[in-house]
């Protein structure tokens, strides 16, 4: 922040201080979870009396944690389908809304956000009631649809924020130059809203991955879900593998971020 | 992709919501107007119980207040972090981005344990305060509103920070330099150059945080505890323990209507600001 | 016809969504069934002990659906009375709800080859008892003297360590009833309980969801709570400083029961499942580390933390009539919410 003059120092320092506290708030609890996952105690405990990797070994043990692996597989499959579906639905809707100043667009925007504010338990209950009335038992498809309803508003909001900044003149000039709508979308619109789309897909993915209330009603014996399983492990026995599972997620996300960073850099170079 | 045909892009989402959200929602509304879920007998008892009862009215206000305070708390830290991200070098940028998504990666289940560790009587904050002599006895944090807001600030911050970072990412750094070299103060640059660009992200974040914090059932009940009454826990209790589904439905719809009203207001502000 | 086309159109839509990853709802093969099971310890135990025994004895494959008792009832009820699994496992409160809602098939105890090993009354026209739960006081021995009875929880030195839970669970409800009795109340009169709670409320360490209790206990926020021997033994085996205290008025006990879901298409397998669950080898394995169930099979000796020599002693424990409790419970829950609210 050296480019700012002396009179700006107090404000710059305040911003830095708040950002530092913000980082602490974001990272602190996660550090506690990570440290706890290495505990030598038999149950979740902080501070850990000693450090060990045995809970990670336990978590990856194909015999002892077989059912956790099944549940993790189910949860990842549902989250991936949910993210894909939500992002596609939300991108279309966000472009439509950002392009129009009509009253319907404003109302639709509000309406599309509605699933976010209905308590998940009530949504899960109502959805199971409705589809039972249609004689549709819970299935993988219904579970994904239910998760996608909850996840789409997250994607819609972040993609919408990116789409709102699109310059209409840019789209018009692309059309005037004879580009097809799809080509305009792929070559002009998508690159511009990509940060929003990526953020939206990510939010939809994690919102599905961590969903308890909708899964409670719409999952079945074939779709045993990870958060429900972890909830039981935590509640009855303070099982440390619950913390280790979070450790794995953080590590994977860290790797993903590095890889994506490389990939995005690569794409940028290719585009340039 | 003309402006007139644009509405067709919203059609898939509209149809999906019609089948998978609006229809169940209508069934929920019908349930709230009946004596039980068989929908045989109509009754306004559930709505009388929600709207005519001071305990339930208070729970509505508590819930909206929790959402609003969480939005303010996340703003306080997310805006500085997003600004720092905007001007930071690549290494720091990556650290901020990773920190921003970290809370989403710790499952809600184990997160509740982390907050017991931090806020508890023998927790991290209290032992720090005690050892530095700032207090002589542990201060209650767990199961208090400030403690819950602190926890929600961490949990909901990504929803504010990610859209903000995305919005600010579109600002050309040269613009900031230009503003500074023209003699504008940092404050003026932030207000005139950065804020207008940040506004869509900021409002998007505020809507998401408000909605998510006011419906965060598990955090509210586990970190907030049984002495703070919020609507989602009451919905859960009526639906899953008492099996009074009309009342659960009426409570859920009340929560939904009040939060939507706030979200719509935020969105109206956003459109006005964006089109002025 | 309308019904058919409605179903057809919807199946097509859902099928399309599901086709990407998994087939929607695979058909059940003969000799297979689905059972609800409590998440956590029960889930692990039944998968490890009961499932292989069932496969070996009867050639039946069982799939488990982890759901708490109230969630099983809610799910069956939301699905118009037809549970998406064949066997329920329930505590007394939800059991009575399930009976009221007619969620169970009539049960014929004579189809259980092991019914003679159950105490009298443990298999009836509704279902069969498969485990017992003994409820009392759990305390941290490093922080306090062993409490003598329920009335101790209201004394200031204990109250400031106490973690309260409401009427949402079976163990919570019967503990609060026993606490009411200790201050002059009864199953019909909870007023003395609320009065006594009001006095200690400013000092109690936490009022929390049952799910939060083990974490609060482990991290020292609370040092006293009401719970069952199963939880105490499980936490103790994992190094938590926790002991079980039998109140002077006696520990309370109730049975965990299994029921066949109405409309089940795997009734034979369901009987074989319940029969295997109460068989001596399975009950014996479940009563030991790391599972610590309280057995109902009279041939199996209960574990060290269970204050009884055999299941026959269960008759001397405090029991409750859930047909009387259930109608009052919504009112108690509502009252508890309001009393606790700041």
Image: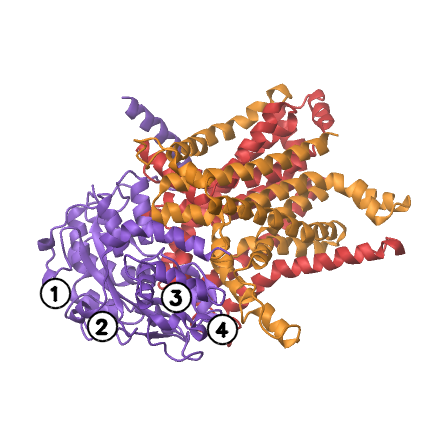
The answer to whether mark 3 and mark 1 are in CB contact below 8 A is no
Q: Position of residue A149 (x, y in %)?
A: 48, 38
Instruction: In this rendered view, identify the residue nearer to me: C166 or C88.
Output: C166
Tell whether label 1 touches label 2 (CB within 8 Å).
no
Circle nearer the viewer, 2 or 4: 2
Between marks 3 and 1, how big is the CA–CA gap?
30 Å
Number of the label disc, if any, that sits on residue C302: 2
Instruction: Give the colour of chain C.
Output: purple
Measure the alpha-carbon separation of dots 2 and 1.
14 Å
Q: Label 4 crowding class (10 Å Cα cut-off): few <14, some 14-19, many 20+?
A: few
**Direction from residue B249 to residue B205 in the image, left or right:** right
Give chain A's shade: red
Q: Chain of mark 3?
A: A
Mark 2 on the same chain as mark 1: yes
Residue at 68% over, 21% down: A178
Q: Position of residue A200 (x, y in %)?
A: 58, 42
Q: Which residue, given by chain and number where applicable, does mark 1 sit on?
A: C117
Residue A241 showing in the rendered view? no
Which is more toward the observer, B213 or B21?
Answer: B213
If you read the primary sequence from the N terminus, does the residue marked by circle 2 or circle 1 appear first? 1
Q: CA distance from mark 1 to mark 4?
A: 45 Å
**Where is mark 3, residue-wise?**
A237
Label 4: chain? A
Say yes or no: labels 2 and 3 on the same chain.
no
Q: Nearer the viewer, residue C22 or C340?
A: C340
Q: Which residue is mark 4?
A: A52
User: Color of chain B here?
Assistant: orange
């Amino acid at each position: 922040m050296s480019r700012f003059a002396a009179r700006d120092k107090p404000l710059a320092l305040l911003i830095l201080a708040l950002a530092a506290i913000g980082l602490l708030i974001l990272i602190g609890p996660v550090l506690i979870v990570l440290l706890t996952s290495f505990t030598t105690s038999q149950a979740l405990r902080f501070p850990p009396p000693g450090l060990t990797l045995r809970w990670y070994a336990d978590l990856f043990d194909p015999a002892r944690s077989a059912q956790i692996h099944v549940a993790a597989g189910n949860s990842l499959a549902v989250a991936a389908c949910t993210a894909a579906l939500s992002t596609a639905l939300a991108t279309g809707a966000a472009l439509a809304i950002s392009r129009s100043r009509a009253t319907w667009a404003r109302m639709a925007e509000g309406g599309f956000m509605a699933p976010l504010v209905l308590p998940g338990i009530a949504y899960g209950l109502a959805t199971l009631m409705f589809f039972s009335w249609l004689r549709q038992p819970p299935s993988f498809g219904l579970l994904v649809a239910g998760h996608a309803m909850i996840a789409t508003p997250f994607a819609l909001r972040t993609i919408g924020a990116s789409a709102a900044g699109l310059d209409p003149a840019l789209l018009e000039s692309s059309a005037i130059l004879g580009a097809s709508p799809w080509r305009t979308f792929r070559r002009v619109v998508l690159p511009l809203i990509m940060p929003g789309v990526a953020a939206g897909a990510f939010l939809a993915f994690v919102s599905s991955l961590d969903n308890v209330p909708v899964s409670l009603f719409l999952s079945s014996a074939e779709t045993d879900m990870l958060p429900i399983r972890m909830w039981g492990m935590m509640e009855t026995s303070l099982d440390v593998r619950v913390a280790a599972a979070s450790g794995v997620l953080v590590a994977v996300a860290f790797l993903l971020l590095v890889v994506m960073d490389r990939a995005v850099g690569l794409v940028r170079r290719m585009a340039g | 992709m003309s402006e007139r045909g644009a509405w067709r892009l919203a059609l898939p989402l509209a149809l999906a919501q019609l089948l998978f959200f609006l229809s169940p929602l209508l069934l929920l509304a019908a349930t709230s107007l009946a004596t039980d879920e068989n929908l045989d007998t109509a009754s306004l008892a559930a709505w009388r119980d929600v709207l005519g009862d001071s305990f339930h009215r208070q729970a509505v206000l508590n819930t909206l207040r929790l959402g609003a305070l969480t939005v303010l708390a996340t703003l306080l830290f997310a805006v500085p972090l997003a600004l720092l991200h905007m001007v930071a070098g690549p290494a720091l940028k990556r650290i901020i981005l990773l920190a921003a998504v970290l809370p989403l990666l710790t499952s809600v289940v184990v997160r509740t344990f982390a907050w017991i560790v931090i806020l508890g009587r023998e927790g991290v904050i209290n032992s720090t305060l005690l050892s530095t002599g700032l207090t002589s006895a542990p201060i209650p944090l767990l199961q208090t509103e400030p403690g819950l807001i602190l926890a929600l600030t961490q949990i909901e911050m990504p929803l504010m920070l990610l859209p903000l970072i995305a919005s600010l990412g579109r600002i050309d750094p040269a613009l900031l330099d230009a503003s500074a070299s023209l003699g504008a103060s940092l404050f003026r640059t932030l207000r005139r150059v950065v804020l207008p660009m940040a506004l869509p992200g900021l409002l998007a974040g505020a809507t998401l945080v408000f909605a998510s914090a006011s419906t965060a059932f598990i955090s509210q009940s586990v970190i907030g505890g049984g002495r703070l009454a919020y609507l989602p826990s009451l919905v859960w209790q009526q639906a899953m323990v008492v099996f009074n589904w009309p009342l659960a439905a009426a409570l859920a719809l009340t929560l939904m209507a009040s939060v939507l009203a706030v979200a719509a207001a935020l969105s109206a502000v956003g459109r006005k600001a964006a089109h002025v | 016809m309308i019904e058919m086309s409605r179903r057809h159109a919807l199946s097509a839509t859902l099928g399309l969504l599901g086709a990407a990853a998994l087939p929607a709802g695979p058909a059940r093969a003969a000799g297979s069934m689905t059972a609800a099971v409590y998440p956590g310890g029960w889930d692990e135990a039944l998968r490890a002990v009961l499932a292989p025994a069932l496969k070996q004895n009867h050639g039946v494959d069982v799939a488990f659906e982890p759901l708490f008792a109230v969630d099983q009832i809610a799910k069956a009820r939301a699905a118009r009375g037809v549970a998406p699994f064949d066997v329920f496992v329930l505590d007394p409160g939800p059991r009575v709800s399930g009976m009221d809602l007619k969620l169970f098939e009539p049960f014929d105890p004579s189809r259980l080859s092991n019914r003679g090993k159950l105490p009298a009354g443990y298999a009836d026209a509704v279902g069969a008892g498969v485990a017992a739960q003994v409820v009392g006081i759990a305390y941290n021995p490093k922080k306090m003297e062993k409490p003598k009875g329920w009335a101790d929880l209201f004394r200031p030195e204990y109250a400031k360590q106490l973690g309260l839970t409401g009427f949402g669970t079976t163990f919570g409800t019967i503990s609060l009833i026993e606490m009411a009795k200790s201050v002059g109340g009864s199953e019909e009169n909870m007023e003395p309980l609320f009065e006594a709670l009001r006095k200690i409320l400013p000092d109690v360490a936490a009022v929390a969801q049952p799910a939060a209790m083990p974490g609060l206990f482990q991290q020292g926020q609370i040092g006293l709570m009401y719970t069952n021997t199963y939880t105490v033994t499980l936490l103790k085996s994992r190094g938590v400083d926790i002991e079980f205290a039998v109140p002077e008025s006696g520990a309370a006990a109730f049975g965990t029961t299994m029921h066949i879901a109405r409309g089940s298409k795997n009734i034979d397998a369901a009987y074989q499942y319940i029969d295997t669950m109460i068989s001596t080898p399975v009950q014996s394995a479940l009563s030991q580390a790391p599972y610590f169930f309280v057995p109902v099979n009279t041939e199996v000796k209960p574990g060290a933390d269970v204050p009884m020599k055999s299941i026959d002693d269960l008759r001397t424990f405090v029991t409750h009539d859930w047909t009387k409790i259930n109608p009052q419970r919504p009112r108690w829950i509502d009252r508890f919410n309001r009393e606790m609210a700041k």
